Structures are given as structure tokens and as C-alpha cells.
Image: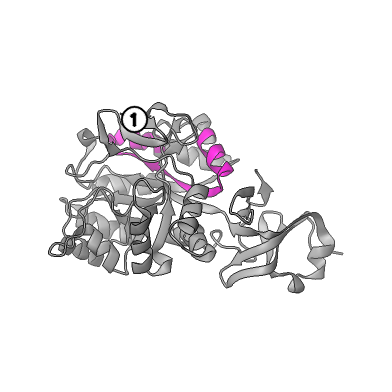
Amino acid sequence: MSEYREAVQLLYGRVVTPAGICDDGVLAIHGENIAYAGIVSELPNELKQAASEVIQQPDGYILPGFVDIHVHGGNGEDFMDASKEVLDKITSFHSSQGTTTMLATTMTAPKAAIDHVLREVDDYRKQGMPYTKLAGVHLEGPFISPKWPGAQNPEHIVHANIDWLEEWASTYPELVRQVTLAPEREGALKAISWLRDHGIVAALGHTDATYEEVETAVEAGLSHGVHTFNAMTGLHHRKPGVVGAMLGDDRLSCEIIADGIHVHPAAMQILARMKPRENLILITDAMSATGMPDGEYTLGDLPVVVENGIATLKDNRDSLAGSTLTMIRGFQMLVRKVGLSIEQASEAASTNPARKIGIADCTGSLESGKLADVLLLSSDLELQGVWIQGQRKH
């Protein structure tokens, strides 16, 4: 009798594994998990015999599902307005764009508003998640710099508060996965050390720090930077700034919004060449208008205008306000315009973010035993299929 009591799905194509691309490859899905990922000739006979569904796309690519650790909303909804209905709408849309795991990302807001998001996301995770899985929450602010608010409301900016962090961590264990702050601000270094000691990613962003202040923060436990090049001090040959530290310090991983709007493709190429390949992370920074027509929306509590897919603050049209990017479009940009290989782009979109937030043991790469979070792409990188924990969603 076969050990495979549940249906087995076989996907034939070019399988992107940690060891490289298997051109004559196959992926076997058994229940929620990957049972095999590799070359066809080594597929166990038991899996062949147990197969109930076979998909053949020999010229297509089979990839791990995308992991977006910086995303504010989509499908007309914002994580700051979290409820079951809102979370369903956001995650259903992003699952259709290849994102199988994400962090619900907050804005700089009053503590009560952040408390609300944490409570709703925690409840949602306990009820079971039908679409993209929420691996936790990314707190972007409120511990940022008033000099670089971007599309964050400066009225709600405060100094780092360890009491708040301790309350959130004790009330919702392992829910907060990442906190973005300005490392030069009062109390930030102590908060960074606290985050490191509690297994939470300490990230810089919306910051006026000098190069030296960033390096001091790295020694304290800072390990990541959000939306590289945006809302931070730039690179100057006498003042390297935040960008200089992010480019030059291999202890820092770097997010990139690969929409061609926030960052020019040439700057993305420079970043990709400077960083070890495991330290480049694709994000969307998507806001509520993602997947929606041009018009007026909000990001947190600030009004936003979207024209030609570009989101800016209504009261300051020079300030970008998140993006309308999806992970599949960002992945395509990295390959088509930036020149990354399929393997490098897959690492940036899946493997690296999963490792960063501590979930690489279960997702982020195609390996036997991991969750079957899987994408099927055509030969020209168009999305053809999405599986989340073994269930085909799109």
C-alpha cells in the first residue's frame, strides 16, 4: 500500500531549487507539503503511481511562492483598517499575484490604532487563512524621523518605546516580526538591542542617520533596511549616509521596491552588485490602490492620489505614497530590466525574505518537507498558477 494517503499533484517544468534550476524537473505535492523537487529521472515510483493530477509545462518555471515582508494593503483596503473582511480582500488579491506569505505592515499611527491591527491579525491567524498567509506584522513606525516621514503622518511620530514593544510581544507572542525605526533617534539603540534579543528584525527606515550612526546601530543589533534609497540620507563621497552604510555593510539586508518608480533600474543593478545575493529582498510596499483603478485613496490616515499607477500624497504630489506594485511584476522587473537570473530573483522574492523573518524552515524554497507554496510561470514569466499549502488558489 502506498504511504501517500492524500492525493499527489505532479508539476513538470523547470524547477527552481536551492541547488539551481532543474530543466527536466518535477515537483510533487502531497497534502500541504512538497514531497519531491528535482529531476524527473529521480522521482520515486510511489509518487508517480499516487498522482491524481499531472500538469505539464516543460518550458515553464516552477518557483517557491513569493514572500512580501513590506505591504500595506491592496484591493481597495488598508491593513490599518483590519477586520476579517478587510484581511480577506487584501490577501485574496495578493495571492492572485503570486504572494503566498506576507507581513501585514502598519503605518505610523497612534498606539491604539496599532493595537487594533495586532489584535485583528492575531485573531485572523487563529481562524485559519484561506488565501495568502499572514506570517505576522511589520511595524513601520511610529519610531521614525520627522525629517523623513515620507507618506507617514508626522503627527504620530514618537521616540522608541520599549514598554510598548514589551506589551505587544507579551500580548501577541511571535506576531511582530519586524520593526522599522530611525536608529539616530532617542531610545532607538536600546530598542534595537531589545528587538535583537527577542528575535524580531530591527530595520532602519525613514531616517536622518549618518553613516556612523548606522554602523553604531548595527553593532547594537540592526540587521535590515527598508525600501533602499527612499526616505533616508543619500550617498555622498564625504558623507556616505544611510545609503552608503546599506550598500557597504554586508551585515545589513536591503529591501528594494522594484517598480521602476521608487528606484531606477540602474540603481537596482548597483544594489544587487554590492550586496551578497542572500541580502537582497524584493518588496512591494503596496498600498490600498494596488489592483484598483486610478483615483483617490488613503494610506493610513493620509489622502493619496493615484495617477497612471503612481501613488502620491494628495497634499504633496512630490511625495510617493507606497506603490501599486505586485510581487509578480517586481519579480519580472528584476529579471527583465535589472538583469538578475531567475534563481537570483527567486531568492530575492522568496528565499531571502523567508529567512529574514525566521520562517525559512517551512517556506521560501522548493524542498522536500516544506509547505507546498508554489508558483507556475510561463516561459516568459507570466503567472499561470498559485498553490498555497498544497491547494491551488489560482
Q: Is residue 380 left or right of residue 265?
A: right
Q: Quadrant of the N terminus?
A: bottom right
Residue occupying the point 47% across, 63% down = 340
Residue at which label 1 appears: 304
Visible residue check, residue 175: no
Residue occupying the point 54% across, 35% down = 88
Q: Secondary structure at mark 1?
A: strand
The colour scheme applied to this rendered structure is one colour
Amino acid at dot 1: Val
Visible residue check, residue 74: yes
Q: Find residue 344 and report its horizontal and vertical position in percent.
A: 49, 65
Q: Is residue 240 left or right of residue 321?
A: left
Look at the picture and state if 78 lies above or below 331: above
Q: Find residue 98 and report its horizontal and vertical position in percent.
A: 56, 48
Say which quarter of the image contains residue 317: top left
Near-viewer residue (169 or 275): 275
Residue occupying the point 38% across, 31% down = 306
Q: Quadrant of the C terminus?
A: top right
Q: Which residues are magenta?
A: 89-117
The residue most toward the left is: 238
Q: Confirm whether the magenta stretch covers residue 290.
A: no
Q: Find residue 392 and report its horizontal and vertical position in percent.
A: 68, 47
Q: How many labels were placed on the picture?
A: 1
Q: Find residue 101 and report its horizontal and vertical position in percent.
A: 52, 49
